[in-house]
Image: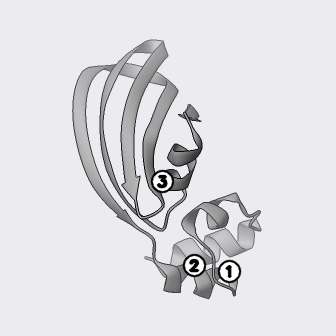
Amino acid sequence: KDLIIVLVDEEAIKAFTAMNQVKLGGEVGVAIGPVGRKMSGDYNISGKGAGLALTYTFSKGLFAGIGLEGAIIRGRAGENERFYGQPATPFAASSKHRKEKESKTYTKSWK
């Protein structure tokens, strides 16, 4: 599954990279066999700002739907620091290159 995220302005980037945020949005998707597309728009609100994030996804299978969603996203600073050995925001942590062995060890610790 391929995913494209478009952050429409500087405020959207600040909101998307915040440690804690509230997300409100909607989506429309259709997939038939090997060809599928899903589009969504989310408004992210955080202590750093608020902004729109647009998402476009390529998918496969059989699906058609429309949805509304809301979420509260909270970063776990202690877990990021434990894994990376230094403080890291969720955005910084997701962009770091991890060795496969480290990723497997971290995943295993949650089971």
Figure check: 44 above or below 61: below
The residue positioned 60% from the left and 61% from the top of the image is 91
Quadrant of the snapshot with the C terminus: bottom left
**46 lies left or right of 83:** left
For disc 3, the marked residue is 15
How far across and how far down the image is residue 29, in percent? 35, 21
The quarter holding residue 49 reads bottom left
- Mark 3–mark 1 Cα distance, whole angstroms, equals 23 Å
The residue positioned 47% from the left and 37% from the top of the image is 53
How far across and how far down the image is residue 17, in percent? 55, 58
What number is the disc on residue 43? none
Amino acid at dot 3 = Ala
Amino acid at dot 2 = Asn
- Label 2 vs 3, first from the N-terminus: 3
Numbered disc 3: secondary structure: helix
What number is the disc on residue 84? 1
Q: For the residues labelled 2 and 1, say whether their Cβ atoms are less than 8 Å apart.
A: yes
- Mark 2–mark 3 Cα distance, whole angstroms, equals 19 Å
For disc 2, the marked residue is 80
- Mark 2–mark 1 Cα distance, whole angstroms, equals 6 Å
Q: For the residues labelled 3 and 1, say whether their Cβ atoms are less than 8 Å apart.
A: no
Is 39 or 7 nearer to us in this picture? 7
The residue positioned 25% from the left and 22% from the top of the image is 65
